[in-house]
Amino acid sequence: MNALLQQLQNRQLIWLANQTEAPYEHCQSTGFSALDQLLGGGWPQHTVIELQSHGACAEVQLIQKALGQSGSDLLQVWINPPASLCAEYLLQQKRPLHQVLQLDAPRSADALWAAELCLKSGSCMDVLLWQNQLNLTQLKRLQLAAAQGQSQLYLFRPTQAEQQLLPWALSLQLTPASRGLQIRILKRKGGWQQQELLLPWAELYPQFIKAELQHSQHSRPPLSRVS
Amino acid sequence: MVAQMEFWLYLYFPQLQLDKLLLQHATTQALDKDQLDLTAPLAIVGADHQLLQLNTAARQAGLTLGMGLASAAALCHQLQLVPHQAEQEQQQLEQLAQLLYQYCADIALQPDSGLLLKLSPMLALYGGALQFWQQLQQVLQQAGYQYHFATAQQPLVARLLAQQGWDQFLLQSDKIQQQLKALPLQQAQLPDKLQEQFQRLGLIRLGDLLHIPQAELVRRFGMDMLQYLQQLTGAKPALLQFIQPAEQFEQQLELLYEMERSDQLLGPLQHLFSLLQLYLQQRDQLAYQLELCLLQRQEQQQQLQLHSAQGEYQSKEWLKLCALQLERLKLKKPVIQLQLTLKRAGPRYAQYKTLFAGKQQLYSALQLVSLLQARLGKEQVKSPCLHNDLLPEQASHYAAALEPQAAIAGHLAAIRPAFLVNPPLALDPDQQQQLQLHCGPERLSSGWWQQQSQHRDYYVGQNAQGQWLWLFRDLQQPEQLYLQGYFS
């Protein structure tokens, strides 16, 4: 091999097509073995992860196990969530309520400012941000802040019709299907993107969907139950 | 003779008002045309139309202190006049005293722009008179006012010598006495009548007076003379009231010109916050809440409440919080005066940082909350909290950010969504038709001890878009479904 190439490879600046196992330096398990396998280890850490969905389809549930593993003495910040937070749900996830902060920032510039401040403060572990538009500069700033404060940003966006070319460390598209959640990798640092996974609902919502009962229980219209 | 000799330092500030003008001019490059030109002749005029303070240009024009207005105008027709403001000078003097209080415990304000400092107790602390004096000189130089000084064993002697402009820091009493004896009687601060009498008697210097036996002087000139002589020789201690540090922090700052943009205010605010820092440092305290009042033209005012959840004393941290609030503020009228009041303070304590998480903290959680609140508003930063209620929309509430929550006993219900819709949304029949129910019912009955009792059956459902919903039906109108929350 060329000496220059060898040198670059030693410094891990070159990505080889057969190295799809662990593209990220630090990974945190997602808690779902199939997803871990798809992502090559788990969620990349200290960066920005995009989750595209049209909402209410287990997008928070998907990261919930990872959130539970991160330090409980650090803050969890929810910026502009789509509805008000349910305290009982947070307690079910073993999250002390005084470690949860909700911010309402009507202006998008304020929301991004708050996210950046929280990320680099070092006193937050996970920041969850609901934001529609993001450009390259803003993403870079958030990524730097996350690396500086060793924190993680999960960005929730509506499903985008046209794909922008933003350098996400990881970008997933979530689509609900009848059997489970369709997870498609849109963008991933150092990996093939055309990969898909169907995560069964029973794994995501074990508390109310049992795997064996999944087919028998639903599909009756609700009004028929009343009479 | 007492074993420990008392020594006093008198600091005399001859032109406080003029120096203040010069200092303000140096710090702000104002572009106003109607501003005073401080390089041209300028004088501060007292109520009796006498010149009290002169700048260098005025002195060069031949004006002297105590000159009447008419002769001054004759000598220099373009002389600018500023009325003397005794109250303002008194304030400046008090500020100076507060500044020096850090270095000297006993400071007394004197009526004619002077400060009297008791040296003797401080010498042991500083390990020598010279070190102490160097420290004081440094502070005075930073303050930027002109001053004269003198030391003596008696307060009155120190004052006479300082006002004469002796400017010697000596602790040898023989040299001081020598200087005192050479002092002309006109400068001895005796009543005019006495001075005239002494002049007629042929007494010129204070030394001549001190040669005459005391009893003779008292017999001829009365009790006033006795008191004066006693103060001069230290036979009777002077009555002095030493200053106490202010109990309440409240500082005002007049702006030199009207400020129309809020970012211009940061310069003057920095000065106010540095005064606050000094105040807090002296008491080893942290400030939690400040009130900033922006006084505006036409007697309007706008008030800002500054909060810090963690408590800060450093001026730069407060300036940062204040800048965030000012960004949001729209000034109604140009600002002419700032007023800063300390509303809540507490003792300072050590701040602990995470030891094992291995993260470098730029801000602590409380600092972060203060910063967020400053920009977004206090109500926009909150933490969820749980109330003891069966109805989900009543149970989940919000409390102030990071407030510790009382844990509620009892087990948690099995199925709860991440997000709640409050109030519940009634679904129309079309939407109801498209729903698939997966799990339920879970019955919640609440308020049966009250007037409005609620009986609800909760279901988990999925709509046509595949979204997971938390729905309920009220038993009183079972055909209607309500949307209570989103699983997410």
Image: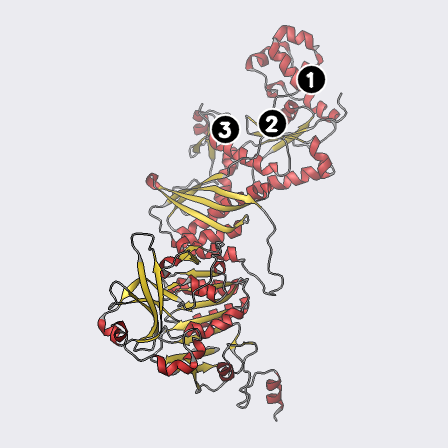
- Under mark 2, the amino acid is Gln
Q: Residue at x 71, y 37 (%)?
A: B125
Where is residue A140 shown, x and y percent of the image?
A: 47, 72
Quadrant in the rendering for residue A105: bottom left
> Same chain for marks 3 and 1?
yes
Label 3 or label 1, whichever comes before in sequence order: 3
Element marked by disc 1: loop
Q: Which residue is mark 1?
A: B235
Front residue of B271/B344: it is B344
For numbered disc 3, what is the local secondary structure?
strand
Compared to residue B299, the image places residue B382 above or below, namely below
Q: Chain of mark 2?
A: B
x, y (%) of residue B146?
57, 36
Q: Nearer the viewer, mark 3 or mark 1?
A: 1
Q: Is residue A136 above or below residue B142?
A: below
Dot 2 and dot 1 within a common chain: yes
Q: Chain of mark 3?
A: B
Residue underneath mark 3 = B52
Q: Quadrant of residue A84?
A: bottom left
Q: Which mark is residue A21?
A: none
The front one of B376 and B20 is B376
